[in-house]
Image (spheres, rainbow, N blue to C red):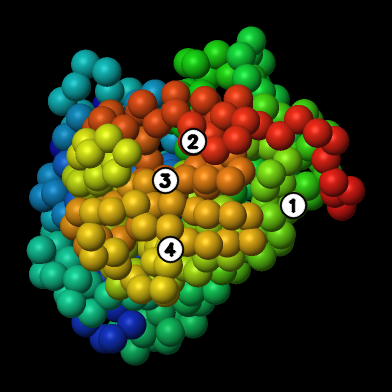
Amino acid sequence: MGSDRRPKSNVQSGYVVLEDGTRFDGRLCGAEGSITGEVVFNTAMTGYQEAVTDPSYAGQVIAFTYPLIGNYGVASAAMESDRAHARAVIMREGKNAPDSSTAEGGWLDWLADRGVVAIDGVDTRALVRHIRDRGAMRGGIFPLELDEAEAAELVAAEPSMSGADLARAVSPAEPVELEGSGPHVVGIDTGIKMSIVRQLRERGCRVTLLPCTVGPREVLDRDPDLVFLANGPGDPAALDYVVDTVRELIGERPLFGICLGHQLLCRAVGLDTFKLAFGHRGTNHPVKDLATGRIAITSQNHGFAVSGPDGEPRIGADEPVRWETDFGSAELSHLNLYDRTVEGLVLRDVAGATVQYHPEAGPGPHDARYLFDRFLDLSTTDGAGPPRRTAAPRDIPA
């Protein structure tokens, strides 16, 4: 199971340094070596293993705001993919002795085995306050013996998240087929979480996941009832090749998108995206469903958002404002009540809908799982607009 803490003689001091020169000292407690990436923070109290294995965290260093991480260990059921994607984690206190009957191992041992650099003993409150004030930025974790000037050079060499195409690195090399007796959902896989796949399969869906470099003709040749645009890492503005594919599919088949998929569908209909100062990452974000008036507490993990109808970053009123696009009207369906950013749209003249957050919510909360049923209804109608198009498709490029 692993010991609660490494022997004191084996504890190695280390530090975090950010691109603006701010430094935080601590104890190295994961895989050996140095690492750089975009430093972001996650406010969830649980779900640390889910976060590290979520492909959307590729290229990032996660600072956990909850002061104790690892107290219930790790288990195969908590994996969101087949490997760790976050480059490193920063903690106030990392615990290695699992106090759970379902644990299969210790958290710190798991991080070391998976090659994830980690540091604890860090004043994470001060670190997070700094990021909230200054924005997410590049940074790294380094052993104490590495000169800080050299560490700063390594951080400066780390590419910016703006303009980063990380989807190719997490997308499957070949199609993945999962049998089911219900609607056929074909996903353009830019980094899908296994929790999403489980929610679709629990509803009987047949699921096909395609590489993110797929063309529109290959998608249509699979004869989907719905096309799903997955979550994933990086800047949506760097994925024009996916946007071009999505644009050719709009009106040919119903589409729904989650997180990065939301941003890509929005860009495909002509809307803009922008980088948030420090993003939304955690399990406590209130979102209002404008169709029902209900407020759900949601799980989120994204650093970019969709601009409002006039290019504004935030929506002032709790109203279903509209965008006019090349594909008809797009209507605001969900609104973030923390910072008034766009959290979802529905296409009113063709079958399509999106949400910015994660309705599957591994490990929770589960307030928004009803959205999977709403999305699956798109296979016959978009809920307000016309039924699914059944005429022969346009001459779609491969």
Earlier along the polypeptide chain: callout 3 or callout 2?
3
Q: What is the distance, in whole Å, between disc 3 and disc 2 at their CAs?
A: 17 Å
Does residue 21 sit above or below 271 in this rendering?
Answer: below
Q: Secondary structure at mark 3?
A: strand
Q: Give 247 or 298, whichever is nearer the viewer.
A: 247
Q: Residues within 10 Å of mark 4 (few under 14, many from 20)?
A: many
Q: Give 158 or 199, whichever is nearer the viewer.
A: 199
Q: Give 380 or 358, whichever is nearer the viewer.
A: 380
The residue where tag 1 is placed is: 248
The residue where tag 4 is placed is: 306
Q: Is residue 6 left or right of residue 264?
A: left
Mark toward the viewer: 3 or 2 = 2
Q: Secondary structure at mark 4?
A: strand
Q: Give 345 or 146, whichever is nearer the viewer.
A: 345
Amino acid at dot 2 = Ala
The label shown at residue 384 is 2
Q: What is the distance, in whole Å, between disc 1 and disc 4 at their CAs?
A: 20 Å
Q: Residues within 10 Å of mark 3 (few under 14, many from 20)?
A: many
In the rendered picture of this protein, how many numbered marks are placed on residues? 4
The answer, for residue 82, to whether it is visible in the render is no
The label shown at residue 355 is 3
Q: Is residue 284 left or right of residue 67?
A: right
Q: Position of residue 356 (x, y in %)?
A: 40, 50
Q: What is the distance, in whole Å, between disc 4 and disc 3 at their CAs?
A: 11 Å
Q: Residue at x 52, y 26 (%)?
A: 376
Amino acid at dot 3 = Val
Q: Residue at x 42, y 67 (%)?
A: 309
Q: Quarter of the image holding residue 393? A: top right
The label shown at residue 20 is none
The answer, for residue 175, to whether it is visible in the render is yes
Q: Position of residue 87 (x, y in %)?
A: 42, 57
Q: Position of residue 294 (x, y in %)?
A: 22, 36
